Amino acid sequence: MRTVLTSKADAASNELVAILVPVGKQPELPAAAPPAAEWSADFGKDKGASVLLRGGKGQRWLLLRVPKASALTSEDLREAAGQARLRAEALDRAGVTIDLGAVDGSAEAAYAAAEAAAMAGYDPAVCKKDRKKAKVKKVSIASCGSSAAVKDAVARAGLAAEGNLFARELGNLPPNILFPQEFAKRARAVCAKSPRTTIKVHGRAALQQMKAGSLLGVSLGSAFEPQLVHMTYKPPGKAKGRVTVVGKGLTFDTGGISIKPSAKMDEMKFDMCGAAAVLGLFHALAGGHPCPYEVHGILGCVENMPGGKAQRPGDIVTAMNGTTIEVLNTDAEGRLVLADALTYAARKTKPDRIYDLATLTGAAIVALGHSATAILGNDDRLRDQVQAAGEVVGERCWPLPLWPVHKELAKGKYADLANIYPGGEGAGTIAGAAFLSYFVDDKPWVHLDIAATAWEGPNRSYFTGGSRGMGVRLLLELLRK
């Protein structure tokens, strides 16, 4: 997929030109378009209205009604651009042009339109023989000038969309195909694409030497070896700082001995979406997305299965930082994996700040529904930055508290910590973050619980079911400046 900037919105016979028309305005059309008398009665006045115009030489114009300029948001532009891409796919067009001439043609508008048009049209049917192949090969953004800022925005949008789509593809793969070693293999392939990205993969033997007993305990019931993946991105010139991003990579989670109900257990292939987001970030960085920071990506890739060798409720494990943990529920496994991944991140990469992304708690759905990611941490300024970045890219986040009382409740009876709160305490999402806070060595840190948003959420034209690639675009926005 190519995403380009163009000065003209020419309707070639193999392309669709989508013209965004604000409420209260009439579209400006080329002479080759049919006269208004033929279509104006079919073009509604409210947001979301659309009409397809046909030219005599195979041209197609799609008029899309968007809010008036004073109310127009980036999300409106993304939704309209996604609709245009879907219509172009349905019309078997090789290209789609988004004409921003009637709206604010700023760099931000160009970015939103280019990003959504490139993301839309993805078919999540990863193993179907008749999986739909994208017909649109080029997205063009027209009538927004040719300034350096606009050019940069369109280029970045294309790379961000590719990173999102890469993460979505990972999330939709079944666990018999995407197991821990395969995840590591794909991470190696991503990092091989650029001299700025390198990788180390630590298997069971290395993890045993590191005394990563918390992570290793989760893997005991699985036939697949756990993998701790460490990727590094080095920017051109002097780095502005060092940032580490950690992703939970449970390639499948049965719950272990504390087995989950059978209904929807198949969806636990999505329990690696945090790691997918981090790898999607590196896919964009390796592709050339600008970033002034040295970035470390840590993936904890494990499968959680029951079996004769599996971890039991009541077991006590010792994490990499020496903390002992009562495993009261083997289905609270993500925090056990992240305990060692975060310790590794804090001590091996020595970052200025840490973010982790994890499909950690179903309680996040209870707290916020599927419309927002829960964010918690030990640095309010950093947390606020995450929330602001989410608003920019349309990946909304909402803060929950993390007070001393929450950390106190994570302490165990027979070990330093327990991996779940005592019965009746509630606050499941906070409990997960409170546990993780013991493994960041007081580094500035924000935890993103994406369990509610990783594969479910509001219908949008640029999401078509399955994994949503949540977090890739947000991370790119956070690391942009």
Image (spheres, rainbow, N blue to C red):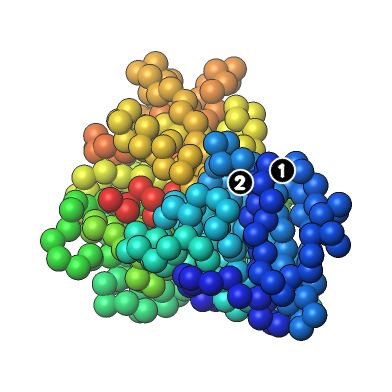
Q: Is residue 184 left or right of residue 365?
A: left
Question: In the image, is residue 152 above or below residue 306?
Answer: below
The residue lying toward the viewer, choosing from 350 and 311, is 350
Query: At 35% from the left edge and 37% from the top edge, which residue is drawn?
Result: 385
Q: Amino acid at mark 2?
A: Asp
User: In this rendering, which labeled residue sits more in front, label 2 or label 1?
Assistant: 1
| Amino acid type indicated by mark 1 | Lys
What's the mark number on residue 47? 1
Quadrant in the picture for residue 282: bottom left
Circle 1 sits in a helix, a strand or a loop, which is it? loop
Q: Are circles 2 and 1 on residues that touch, CB within 8 Å?
A: yes
3D distance between C-alphas at marks 2 and 1: 9 Å
Q: Residue at x 38, y 19 (%)?
A: 403
- Please tell me whether residue 89 is drawn above or below residue 315 in the rendered image: below
Report the side of 210 relative to 307 (left or right).
left
Name which residue lies at 49% across and 72% down.
6
Going 72% across and 67% down the picture, which residue do you hit?
61
